[in-house]
Image (cartoon, helix red, strand yellow):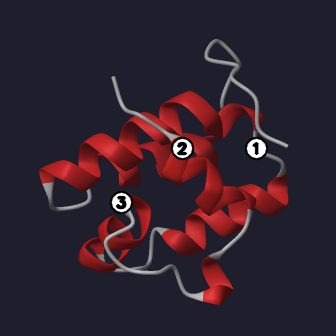
Amino acid sequence: MMIDLPDAPLDPRRKRLIFRSDHRGTKEMDLLLGSFARRHIAAMDEGMVDRFEALLELSDPDLYNWITGQEPTPVEWEGPLMDRLKAHRYR
């Protein structure tokens, strides 16, 4: 379950994932994944953190197209994390 806890203390792994999310290589994905990680990572359980870390290994073009609905998301990436990413609007 993910809820917004922006002031929760973060462990080193979560801090590292935020950094990786903010430094993807394309500005669009830096904004999208970086803002998502800052907003949601503190409330992710370990399984969701594992899933998010695996997602960060995927290519920016694929992720961007899945998140924005330009291409269908592969079945193996459907689920709560992708649903939350698709609903996320960076600010």
Q: Gap between marks 2 and 1, in whole Å?
A: 16 Å
Residue 66, above or below 46 = below
Looking at the rendered structure, the kind of residue marked 2 is Ala
Looking at the rendered structure, the kind of residue marked 1 is Met
Q: Secondary structure at mark 3?
A: helix
Please report the residue visible at 34 percent of the width from the left and 45 percent of the height from the top.
32
Q: Position of residue 45 (x, y in %)?
A: 83, 48
Q: Residue furthest top?
A: 7
Which of the two labelled residues, at mark 2 and mark 3, occupies the earlier sequence position? 3
Q: Residue furthest bottom?
A: 75
Density class for disc 2 (Cα within 10 Å; few <14, some 14-19, many ≥20) is few
Q: Is residue 77 left or right of residue 34?
A: right
Residue 25, above or below 27 = below
Q: Which mark is residue 44?
A: 1
Residue 40, above or below 23 = above
Circle 3 residue: 68
Q: Quadrant of the N terminus?
A: top right
Q: Secondary structure at mark 1?
A: loop
Residue 41 falls in image quadrant: top right
Looking at the rendered structure, the kind of residue marked 3 is Thr
Q: Say which of 48 and 28 sits in front.
A: 28
Q: Is residue 65 left or right of residue 52?
A: left
Q: Quadrant of the C terminus?
A: top left
Q: Nearer the viewer, mark 3 or mark 1?
A: 3
Which of the two labelled residues, at mark 3 and mark 1, occupies the earlier sequence position? 1
Q: Gap between marks 2 and 3, in whole Å?
A: 9 Å
* Residue contact at pointers 3 and 1, CB within 8 angstroms: no
Q: Gap between marks 3 and 1, in whole Å?
A: 22 Å
Q: Which mark is residue 87?
A: 2
Please report the residue visible at 40 percent of the width from the left and 49 percent of the height from the top.
33
